[in-house]
Image (cartoon, rainbow, N blue to C red):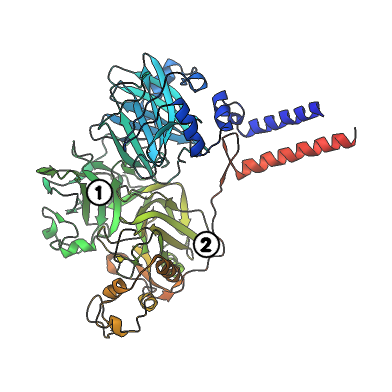
Amino acid sequence: MGAMSSTISDSITQALKQVDPALIDMPQAVHDGAQQPRNRASGRATATRDWKRAKAHDVLSGSDEEGDEGSDAPYSDPYEDELSEAHSLDGKSFGHSAVLDGEGKYQVHWSHQGDTITFLLQVETLGYVGFGFSPNGAMASSDIVLGGVENGKPYLQDYYTDENRVLYRDSQQDYKLKYAKENGTHTLLKFSRALHTCDSNDRTITESTVRVIWAYHADDMGATGLIYHGSYRGRKSLRLLNPEKDSELPLETPFFNFTNVDVPIPDKDTTYWCQMFKMPTLSKKHHIVKVEPLIQKGHENLVHHILLYECDRNASDAVLDSGHECYHANMPDIFLTCETVLYAWAIGGEGFIYPPHVGLSIGLSTDPKYVLMEIHYDNPSHQEGLTDNSGIRLYYTPHVRKYDAGVLEMGIWVSLYHMIPPGMPAFSSEGHCTMECLEEALNNEKPSGIHVFAVLLHAHLAGRAIKARHFRKGEEQRLLAYDNEFDFNFQEFQYLEEERTILPGDNLITECQYTTKGRSTMTWGGLSTRDEMCLSYLMYYPRINLARCESIPEITEQLHFIGVKEIYTPVTSWPFIIKSPKKYNNLTFTDAMNTFQWSQKKGHTFNDRVRKMQINVRCSKYEGHEWMVQGMIVSPPKVKKTHEQEPFVCLSLSNCLNSDMLIFLLTTLLNMLYILNDHVLHS
């Protein structure tokens, strides 16, 4: 039986290798780490014994003790020749890149393939370099890697911090150093890791926004350990799994710029500046094929995001002045007609390039004539005397592509009828692009459907997570897009891995998760950043005459929840006035909602009630025209089946398996047991 068991063990080993050789051929250090308990408490015990503890003070700091190298020695790929090394350290060979600091001293390039992501760090230092992932941009509970080159010897170590910002060396080393060198001024580190490491001390990398934290120091870690880096640190939100796109255009591709001119930046935290521009006059149809940010040098941390909106074609050149502070009482009313997002960029983001068969049409009488550029300036140190000249560059071509791009706004119609109670740790809102709206618009415009290739998810400061859901005949399809780590200061179009077709009769839901802890009054739907939105912008082709596909819960049913019985009619003021009961008499409905004694329990009950309420359909064309279903009252769609994302299963070998791999392994094991049983019976 011993020999028989050994044979079966060998067979299972071979089966595991067929799934993933790394499951067996792992360094001994990984086996050693996997044998240790994987909770933070046990990790802390090991780290305390082998490494000095240090307070991170919201930045990377700590120290190590000499020794305990062994199996945790840094790795350098012995098979990389000089040619591949040179190529691998060229940032252009990576699909994405970002400058993490305001001076261009810390650059990161990355690409992902399958379940592996590879990074190249180029940092202006000859000391250690820190890089990591945080749940909120701070140091607590972060996943960190530290590396460099010391005395010609490369090193890279996997760390983590606990909830108290104490730094520990991870017993499971999941970052694999591919190459490292110093060139006299910079340290270059190339390394990889799995998206799902199945290590409780690591953060899983998904399609959601990732808060990247970084640091560096002039000196290496050395025998005395990690030296506090001072101000050489920061954070930036990135989306690491965006599909890679070829951003190269012919050198002769024409372009035009929309830029601010000496805009004065007030000495306050936040400023939104709005400027209207007129599209260039062209003799024939052209396509915009790429848009990229133009950030004034030195203002990389001042300019937080840029949005470009399409405006009412009936505007006049009189509005093309020096601009105004957005959402201010003195802002021209015509600015409020600029609602459809054409382009979005946020700090840390990249330019947007259209697919090779699609472009944004300009030059025709039906194309956008006026646009509004909104720039969010972030000035937390209240610097005085700043002026800015940032903006965007739009590349266009007379070589018209096959399809015109369109942008569809879907979600919750922005109004006071969208309300979120105060003090809620979690609250969910849903906006419906209804079957009725899509059926009428698509059957009239494009019965074969439209094809979505990018999505922008949009909320304000209370937003925590957003997803764009797609249903067909009551069954949920794969998510169009999602962000479970939403960051208001980082909003940009997400490319889809595969184009998605929307057909007549489908329905789409934008679902937003909020938290209003710390707020004492209702949060309303509105334009201010303290108000809220729940929107998805679908970039698609071919363009049809559908600008908005949205909904709003019935206001009367929401008011019934707090006991409102009657309002004054006809409605002559906004917000309208309540007549009864007596406790709300002569109050606006907004004041009545704030008068109500909210609790978390009442807030959750209200949330459940709102999600089941009838909804008012908003289904509008461009130029303010409406489809026939506009204003229809319908019930939320019945969901027959929801889409569940395939889970990853973590085995004791510290690797992740999806359900297909697990089924394969279990089937192999059962077959081996059957063979064993059959052999015993016939022996």
Q: CA distance from mark 1 to mark 2?
A: 34 Å
Q: Residue at x 34, y 35 (%)?
A: 56
Dot 2 alpha-carbon crowd within 10 angstroms: few under 14, some 14 to 19, many 20 or more: some
Question: What label sits on residue 279 in the rendered view?
Answer: none
Q: Amino acid at mark 2?
A: Arg
Whether residue 117 is visible, yes or no, is: yes
**Is 447 left, or right, of 188 in this rendering?**
right
Viewer-side residue, 604 vs 253: 604
Residue for badge 2: 472
The spot of residue 598 in percent (x, y) is: 35, 69
Looking at the image, residue 588 sits to the left or right of residue 602; the answer is left
- Above or below for 33 versus 560: above
**Residue 565, percent from left and from top:** 35, 84
State the image quarter where residue 619 is shown: bottom left
- Where 142 falls versus 493 (above or below)? above
SS at mark 2?
strand
Q: Quadrant of the C terminus?
A: top right
In primary-sequence order, the first of circles 1 and 2 is 1
Residue in front for this viewpoint, 460 or 624: 460
Of the two numbered discs 1 and 2 in the rendering, the one whose residue sits closer to the viewer: 1
**Left or right placement of residue 446 versus residue 124 in this view:** right
Looking at numbered disc 1 in the image, what kind of residue is underneath it? Answer: Ile
Viewer-closest of 163 and 189 = 163
Residue 175, visible in the rendered structure: no
Q: Report the residue marked by disc 1.
A: 306
